[in-house]
Image (cartoon, grey):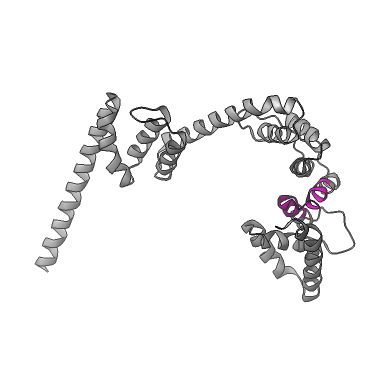
Amino acid sequence: MKKIALMTTAGLLLSFQVELASAASISAAKRAFDEQNYSEAMTELTPLAQEGNADALNMLGKMYENGWGVEADPEQAMRYYERGARQGNLDSVNSIRALKNKAFKKEFDSLLPDAETGNASAQNRIGEMYEFGQGVDRDPDTAFSWYQKAADQGNVTAWHNLGRAYNFGTGVEQNYETAEQWYLKAAEQGHQQAMFFLGTLYATNHGTDTSKDSDVIAYAWLYNVAEQGDRTASAIETRMKMKLTDAQLSEAQALAEELKSKYIDPFSN
């Protein structure tokens, strides 16, 4: 018993010593960092970061983001920030957001001239950036306008995005029937996400095709998306399968095969 107690005490002392050494190292690293002695900071921070120290990861991220003592490397900075964020460092979380916004702003500025001169792909992407507030203030109405311009030129993803806009009333009055029309137009060109949203439209009883049960149609679309590796579609499809009768499931599987032959196989490599 005494031997066990001694071993436990020794283990606790060793752990305490390690913690003290780690605390001393991070203090030295912070001091070097604050004094802009980045060579010493790098020497101190690297082993701490390898151990998963959140503050060390965050400081290394700042060094790579700003080119302090190292060649600037935003991608490496992001990797350090992401590791720091996973360890709960809020400064890393904010830095990730700032880096992404900086990249989005650069992308927006580079794409806008092409969009304004009629490039459909650029128009669609500008629409997405306005919809989600990426590099620009969020503006659903302007997003819809850009989607429409791209869609008018035959951009398939813009057709899908118009479907979402009408589906959820984003920048336009909600209209499920119009949403379905745009989703179907994109799905007919093999657009996987359009197929997914068609499935969810019918799963929520907002589809317009009354020739079959809504769950049957929903299952058929979602099954095909799941077969392409979409985990969300797979989870929904599995739950829907439990709702269907044997007859409905047989009908849904036949419809899934029909949809696959029309809208997936022709676009497969």
- Secondary structure predominantly adopted by residues drawn in magenta: helix
Point out the image quarter for the C terminus. Answer: bottom right
| Residue 22 image point, x, y percent | 23, 42
* Outermost residue toward the bottom in this view: 246
From the viewer's perspective, tell me whether residue 154 is left or right of residue 17: right
From the viewer's perspective, tell me whether residue 190 is left or right of residue 83: right
Q: Residue at x 30, y 40 (%)?
A: 46
Report the span colored magenta.
182-198
* Residue 159 seen in this snapshot: yes
Which of the pair 50/117 is nearer the observer? 117
From the viewer's perspective, tell me whether residue 241 is left or right of residue 61: right
Q: Verify whether residue 118 appears in magenta.
A: no
As drawn, 89 above or below 237? above
* Residue 137 seen in this snapshot: no
Residue 161, quarter of the rendered image: top right
Q: Which residue is drawn at 35% across and 33% down?
A: 59
| Residue 220 image point, x, y percent | 77, 63
As drawn, 184 above or below 55? below
Which of the pair 56/7 is nearer the observer? 56
